[in-house]
Image (cartoon, helix red, strand yellow):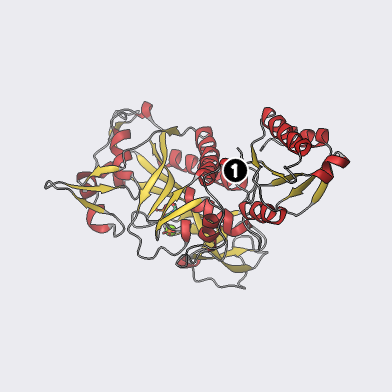
Amino acid sequence: MRQSQLFTKTRREAPADEVSKNAQLLIRAGYIHKEMAGSYSYLPLGRRVLERIEAIVREEMDAIGGQEIRMATLHPAEPWKQTGAWDKVDVLFKIQSRTEKEYTVGQSEEEIATPIAGEYISSYKDLPVAIYQIGQKYRDELRAKSGIMRGREFTMKDMYSFHETQEDFDRFYAIAKQAYLRVYERLGLVAKATEASGGSFTEKTSYEFMVLTDAGEDDILYCSNCPYCVNVEITDQKEGDGCTRCGAGTLARATASEVGNIFDLGQKYTRDFNITFKTKEGEEAYPIMGCFGIGITRLMGVIVEALADEKGIVWPSTVAPFAVHLVGLNLEDDAVRDWALGVYQNLRARGVSVMYDDRDLRPGEKFADSDLMGIPYRVVVSRKGKEAGTFEVVTRATGEVRHLTEEELYNDFDSDPDT
Ligand code: ATP
Ligand code: MG
């Protein structure tokens, strides 16, 4: 896309009331627009990033057998009363209609997913099944000061699985845990599978997936030697203690952000909605259920927090809105402009996504915008480069500068699967 056509512009200042780094940078670079604390719109650049994150999550959920659906977001009150959530879940928004009827919007959607799956579960042959969606969630959060990391409206991937036996649930839970770790790795993050409280429905521990960042709201202890990691909420251990899991490392304390959570829900919801199946032995039983959440918009914020530098955002190539920021200088010179346009078209013909800065601005302003926006590779077309027959190619994450010929540039992108 040509940057002169992009309707958003970069800004020097973020709104005064925006205290979080992720939202400040994303607003300044034109990725998001703030509606109020905890509610943001996603603009062309932001939407592209979100969709790339969603695509990775979708691929990994499909790979473990998840079937994607799209649930209603406006719900009748009844199922929420049936599970007790109507009175117990303090973040649940309740909507009063002009009629006597009450409605709600989903903060998580066991109340909708369980009856949907239940319609089609009658025999052990119908199990296991896992359904998921990627969609909006609404929570009446008291504090929403972490930008897109804690929204009153946010995007979540929520999957619900149904199993014949505890053993089958455990099997799937382990597979899902690995799929989660793959998601975070593909997003350029290091997430720790952290032992945490199982919430209100189960005595068991659950796993939270935690990315170390000072912008997070959780505290964890993790082992210096093995993958063991635990939320401080559920342990008496302290920083510096030896790790009892591997016996070799010591525990370090860190602040982290929860980017996903996987739970054993047992039979809580299948009992509430009276969903049963016929076992092999011909008896009626309640399926064991799991729920598996990933915070999509929170992840976008965490990527910004974890990877940004003093100049701006740094996207991993797997989620960047464009692979290349083609920055044209001296475009008033016809020969340079034609060359830049040719490179823009050739890169696109090779399937490389390109933001072409064809605006009439000074080089310093273009480079500052480019650093702020965080596209992984900056390719500079200029009169000087034209004379030498090369482009300056700057890797945003490392600052590495290379001078490549047109052919070298194309070879470089032909070999990078993430572009
Ligand atoms: P937290 O402890 O941060 O409040 P939670 O434990 O209530 O989150 P879940 O109900 O397990 O969260 O939701 C699944 C995932 O959705 C979380 O792991 C997190 O990544 C994301 N998430 C939860 N609440 C929000 C929010 N208000 N804004 C953005 N993302 C959220
Ligand atoms: Mg939590």
* Relative horizontal placement of residue 94, taking residue 44 as reference (left or right): left
Of 339 and 344, nearer the camera is 339
Given the current orientation, which residue lies at the most extreme right position?
388
Residue 251 seen by the camera: yes
The quarter holding residue 125 reads top left
At mark 1, the secondary structure is: helix
Residue 192 visible in the picture: no
Taking the spot 53% from the left edge, 33% from the top edge, the residue there is 63
Q: Position of residue 277 (x, y in %)?
A: 30, 32
In this rendering, position of residue 231 left or right of residue 212: left
Looking at the picture, how far across and down is residue 295, in whole percent? 47, 50
Q: Residue 145: x, y in percent?
A: 44, 65
Residue bearing mark 1: 4
Q: Is residue 239 shown left or right of residue 381?
A: left
Q: Is residue 162 above or below residue 230?
A: above
Residue type at mark 1? Ser
Q: Quadrant of residue 334?
A: top right
Residue at 64% from the left image edge and 45% from the top image edge: 359
